[in-house]
Image: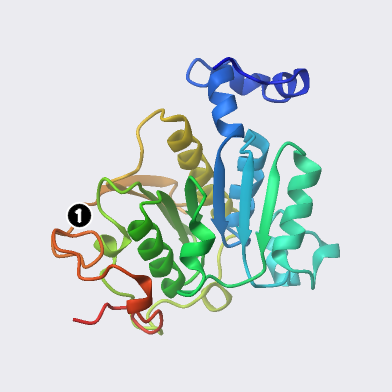
């Protein structure tokens, strides 16, 4: 099929189109792609900005929170006039101003076992930009059980990690079989985070998403990329699938997210 880019699109995406690994056909593929971003905060902001700029045709934004003044230090798609507004509305407005080629679908809600499968259906990739373990396990389980690739990111103080789970290797429960105790890892409000760290990690998440959609480069599937802003060290650590994993293992114990309680340590009952 011949590329269908119009003159405005050829101009807008010209710096990508000239890349041999992208070209007009690759840009067409991006424009035909759909990505769901779960979390419109510190990680979700750079993800949304760069996916919209790259020309992802349809972006889904899921978040039940409103913008707070303390968010603005790192959540770069929101401004002072957005304080008090739903993050999904502020994010959608940002995308519309940046790139009218992109269709935005918003859900002002928290991801839950009741809505996760329905929200994920119809998207090519999910980006996990959440900030707590129950939500991360829910994204993992819903995506793994539906066969939807997803890109995970997390930050803590001066550090961050990124990996991709495309269904051909380990899942998030191979990295964390269960969540650590609730008081073991303080949240961002308690522990703090350097504002640029979510920007770095979110940008890598956006990169992984675009690579997956274009089928180029080497994915982080089977590897966890760890970044330390203090030392500027970047380490790629192998991650192997666990044969006994109850979600992606040799004999999965669970075939529905409704069978799991997403609170506490998020462990799957025996």
Percent coordinates x, y for residue 175 in the rendering:
27, 61
Q: How is the image coloured?
A: rainbow
State the residue in front, 213 or 75: 213
Q: Vertically, is 62 above or below 185?
A: above
Percent coordinates x, y for residue 53 in the rendering:
67, 37
State the residue in front, 269 or 2: 2
State the residue in front, 80 or 50: 50
Quarter of the image holding residue 192?
bottom right
Q: Vertically, is 118 above or below 240?
A: below
- For numbered disc 1, what is the local secondary structure? loop
Quarter of the image holding residue 253?
bottom left
Residue 156 visible here: no
Residue drawn at (46%, 78%) of the image: 186
Instruction: Quarter of the image for the N terminus: give it.
Output: top right
Left or right of 48 in this view: 240: left
Percent coordinates x, y for residue 197 in the rendering:
54, 54
State the residue in front, 162 or 65: 65
Q: Local crowd at mark 1 within 10 Å, few (<14), some, or many (≥20)?
A: some
Left or right of 14 in this view: 206: left
Label count reads: 1
Percent coordinates x, y for residue 23 in the rendering:
55, 17
Residue 161 visible here: yes
Residue drawn at (41%, 30%) of the image: 215
Q: To which residue does mark 1 refer?
A: 241
Residue drawn at (66%, 45%) of the image: 49
Instruction: Quarter of the image for the C terminus: give it.
Output: bottom left
């Amino acid at each position: 099929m011949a590329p269908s880019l119009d003159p405005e699109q050829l101009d807008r995406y010209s710096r990508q189109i000239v890349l041999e690994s992208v070209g007009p056909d690759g840009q067409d593929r991006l424009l035909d792609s759909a990505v769901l971003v779960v979390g419109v905060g510190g990680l979700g902001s750079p993800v949304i900005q760069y996916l919209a700029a790259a020309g992802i045709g349809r972006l889904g934004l899921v978040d039940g929170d409103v913008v707070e003044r303390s968010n603005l230090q790192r959540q770069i798609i929101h401004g002072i006039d957005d304080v008090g507004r739903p993050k999904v509305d502020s994010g959608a407005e940002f995308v519309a101003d940046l790139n009218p080629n992109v269709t935005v679908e918003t859900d002002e809600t928290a991801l839950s076992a009741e809505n996760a499968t329905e929200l994920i259906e119809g998207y090519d990739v999910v980006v996990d930009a959440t900030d707590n373990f129950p939500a991360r396990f829910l994204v993992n389980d819903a995506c793994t059980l539906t066969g939807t690739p997803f890109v995970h990111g997390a930050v803590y103080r001066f550090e961050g990690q990124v990996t991709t789970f495309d269904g051909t290797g380990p899942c998030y429960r191979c990295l964390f079989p269960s969540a650590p105790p609730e008081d073991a890892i303080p949240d961002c409000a308690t522990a703090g985070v350097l504002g640029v760290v979510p920007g770095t990690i979110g940008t890598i998440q956006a990169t992984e998403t675009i690579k997956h959609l274009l089928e180029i480069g080497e994915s982080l599937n089977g590897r966890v990329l760890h970044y330390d802003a203090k030392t500027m060290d970047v380490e790629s650590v192998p991650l192997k699938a666990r044969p006994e994993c109850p979600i992606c293992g040799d004999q999965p114990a669970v075939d529905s997210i409704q069978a799991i309680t997403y609170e506490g340590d998020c462990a799957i009952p025996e």
